[in-house]
Amino acid sequence: MRRLRGIGVSAGIGAGRAVILIQRAQILRFSIPAALIHSEIARLEDARRRSSDQLDRIQIKLPGTDLGALFDAQRLMLDDPMLVPRAAAIIGEQRVNAEWALQQVFDHLASVFDSVEDPYLRERKGDLADVVGRLRMNLTPGGSGFRDVLGQCESPCVLVADELPPSIAAQLDWTKFQAFVTNAGSRTYHTAILARSLHVPAVVGLHDATEKIPPGTMILVDGEQGTVSIDPPPEAVGQAAATGRIGRRSTTQPAAPFRTSDGVKVLVEANVDLLGDAAFALAQGAEGIGLFRSELLLAGRPADAVTEEMQYEVYRQLLEDMSPAPVTIRTFDIDEDQLASGEQRRDTLWASGYEVPRSRLGLRSIRLTLKRRELLRAQLRALVRAAAHGHLRVLFPFVSGVDELREARSVLNEARQEIQARGETLHPLLVGVMIEVPSAAFTADLLAAESDFLTIGSNDLIQCCLAVDRTDERVSHLYEPLHPAILRLIRHIRRAALRRGVPLSICGEMASDPAVLALLIGLGLTQFSMTPAAIPLAQQVIQELDSRELRKIAAQVLRLSSAIEIEQCLTEGLTRTKVLGSEVE
Ligand code: PEP
Ligand code: MG
């Protein structure tokens, strides 16, 4: 048995097989049971096929160009027996996941490229990295990357990461992961605060745990002592399992409404993509649906194939399932490609050879549906009818100013008149605007004056405000929810909504990070909508917070000039004032 020593930041003992996550380089490594080797190799083969199709489509667009020749080379690499077949062999030999097998092959081939004299050949390492990156992306197509793969790990396990961003930590299944350890970190490290809220044993600041601990090894984490035992004696593991995690939170959550420790009521609703997710949202404690992404109904189908009647059935069911809780249904947030068939959608090619969705700033969302009025009108007719079955809020996405809101409202009026002309009764519904475009943020007072509620779509607001496409990995590090510009915008929107007496919520990913949630409460927000998996933790954290302290922290961070300073100040503030993570001091 070997023992590593770090900083114990969250008390308790947890044991399980190590799952290694190199978050910075996007590498995940874990062992798989023999029975899954076959399906893991099939997953890799699927990724190869998808990559191959993508390269074919790229080449069709670039015949005879230099860029085309570059992709010829990538094609050859993709089909080379030293790449995918070698990775498949590693999966079988080492019983590891496809991502890690691929990484090992890449490391080996990269070192071969490094050792060649010819500078032209040496540069081909970049192409290899590109091909491997494409394969990696295609291993979890359409998924949320790590989260999907982490969900497949065998229980019980312990996460060993270089660092663990709260956005990932908040959504992991902590009944499966018994503890976590990280290379990075200190006692006031953002994730350490989260660990204490989760009541998950954690040791941070281990520097090289991801290298010293082989995937699949049994490890025992003592969050009190700050130690990690590698290959501990079975008696110690048995004892840990019998004791259970010390300090682990009870699974019986008090019921809504949730209040901060000083009595401020905070509402937590769910972002739901599919009708079937509503039950899960309720089970997670959602007090309503703050965002239903209706465009998922169109996925892979021509828009006109999704009729008013089909939509009405879905919306009615959703409202009935959630009743009496409110349901916010966003009108289609699609772009032109999404209107086309699923196959054509991925054909967009960027000059560098990466595939990215067509510009977020083009004809999309409310702009597109206002041009395709019949599409919007049919959706609004379905919504007007569904309003009979519950508490409905209709939400217009990506609005950039009052003119669009007025036009959308006039289409809603047309839809109402059509329903009335059919002899059906009209029922009340609320109309709201998503604040995702900086121009909408700056005119929030004008939009609030003509709507029943506002909701901040922080995912797009951050992208648009900071001019960062977060799917472009070369700039994704600039995507900073805590950028001073974002916090100032949120403060501005909040003031506008307050002055007009219009309810304001936030439904972007931002709110699912507990520390950021605390800051948002400090900025005066009390209504949130997030991915259902993040709800129990958010509700638990809310009850540990003191809004008066949070207001002071918010005032302090608003005076700072960079996201890094803000994150540091926030983390220190939350630890110092014991509004969060007060167990270890
Ligand atoms: C947002 O932009 O914050 C949002 C919730 O919308 P989506 O993520 O669907 O673009
Ligand atoms: Mg959005």
Image (cartoon, rainbow, N blue to C red):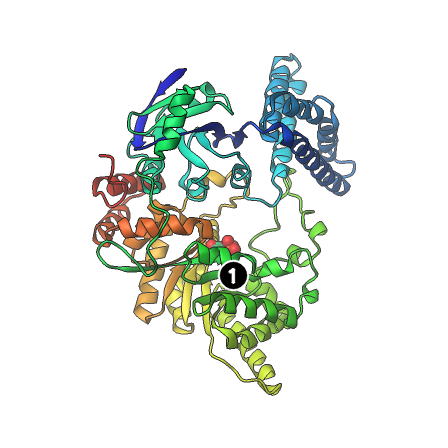
Say which of 414 and 272 sits in front: 272
The N terminus lies in which quarter of the figure? top left
* Residue under the point 48% across and 53% down: 460
The residue pinned by badge 1 equals: 292
From the viewer's perspective, tell me whether residue 2 is left or right of residue 8. Answer: right
Residue 326 is drawn in which quadrant?
A: bottom left
Q: Does 343 sit above or below residue 33? A: below
The C terminus lies in which quarter of the figure? top left
Work out whether residue 183 can be spotted: no
* Residue under the point 45% across and 41% down: 168
Residue 39 x, y percent position in the rendering = 67, 34
Residue 237 is drawn in which quadrant?
A: top left
Residue 263 is drawn in which quadrant?
A: bottom left
Work out whether residue 299 can be spotted: yes
Q: Does 48 sit above or below residue 205? A: below
Residue 405 x, y percent position in the rendering = 49, 70
Amino acid type, callout 1: Phe
Residue 318 x, y percent position in the rendering = 53, 66
Say which of 480 and 204 sits in front: 204
Count of numbered marks: 1
Q: Element at badge 1? A: strand
Q: Is the residue indicated by label 1 positioned so its CB lies within 8 Å of ligand 1? A: no
Q: Does 247 sit above or below residue 488? A: above
| Category of crowding for the residue at label 1, using alpha-carbon neighbours closer than 10 angstroms: few (below 14), some (14–19), many (at least 20) | many
Residue 453 x, y percent position in the rendering = 41, 68
* Residue under the point 64% across and 30% down: 35
From the viewer's perspective, tell me whether residue 180 is left or right of residue 568. Answer: right
* Residue under the point 47% across and 75% down: 429
